[in-house]
């Protein structure tokens, strides 16, 4: 199985082939998962947050369950501060999925409950990060995903 190159650093993801399927080890959930195109992006973004942004591995949740308007949802990646408050949400899509308004609406719905300051949307090729200014009820896009020290500030 050929995995598409992403616009993220390359990481040595632990991959195995079993029962004619490719599996990737999720170091956060500590188990092998079927390697779908979206999982390829999600795992790379987790490693990016750890190795490039300095996020502590033990303060990252993957596919965390939450309720939005009485419906069960799963956020792809959530980064917490040391007090357990969510600070950043990442929504991942497969590389062939275009990032559009619906994607931003989805992550905004998750943020109604979590109320983080940083939102990231990525399909592994394009990444959009925005800062949510809760005091002024506004947001603005920023160039790069910030380092953990800035995320929790």
Image (cartoon, rainbow, N blue to C red):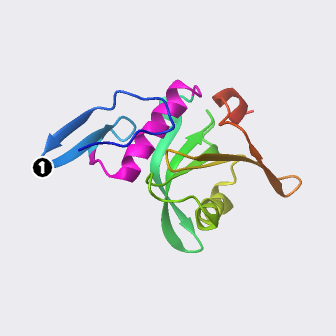
How many labels, in total? Answer: 1
Q: Position of residue 83 (x, y in %)?
A: 63, 36
Figure check: 94 above or below 100? above
Q: Name the residue located 55 percent from the left edge and 74 percent from the top edge.
A: 70
Q: Is residue 62 left or right of residue 122?
A: left
Q: Name the residue located 48 percent from the left edge and 29 percent from the top edge.
A: 9
103 or 149, which is in the foreground? Answer: 103
Q: In terms of secondary structure, what is the magenta stretch mainly?
A: helix
130 or 135, which is in the foreground? Answer: 130
Secondary structure beneath disc 1? Answer: loop
Q: Is residue 19 left or right of residue 93?
A: left
What segment carries the magenta color?
33-54
Q: Position of residue 102 (x, y in %)?
A: 60, 68
Residue furthest to the left: 19
Q: Position of residue 138 (x, y in %)?
A: 83, 56
How packed is label 1: few (under 14 Cα within 10 Å), some, or many (20 or more)?
few
The residue that mark 1 highlights is: 20
Q: Position of residue 125 (x, y in %)?
A: 52, 45
Figure check: 32 above or below 37? above
Q: Name the residue located 45 percent from the left edge and 51 percent from the top edge.
A: 95
């Amino acid at each position: 199985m050929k995995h598409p190159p992403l616009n993220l650093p390359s990481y040595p993801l632990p991959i195995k082939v079993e029962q004619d399927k490719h599996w990737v080890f999720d170091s956060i959930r500590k188990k092998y998962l079927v390697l779908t195109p979206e999982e390829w992006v999600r795992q790379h973004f987790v490693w990016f947050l750890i190795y490039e942004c300095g996020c502590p591995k033990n303060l990252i949740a993957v596919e965390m369950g939450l309720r939005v308007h009485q419906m069960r949802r799963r956020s792809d990646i959530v980064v917490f501060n040391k007090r357990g408050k969510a600070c950043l949400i990442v929504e991942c899509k497969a590389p062939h999925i275009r990032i559009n308004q619906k994607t931003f609406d989805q992550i905004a719905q998750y943020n109604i409950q979590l109320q983080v300051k940083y939102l990231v949307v990525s399909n592994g090729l394009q990444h959009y990060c925005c800062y949510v200014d809760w005091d002024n009820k506004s947001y603005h896009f920023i160039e790069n995903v910030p380092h953990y020290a800035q995320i929790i500030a």
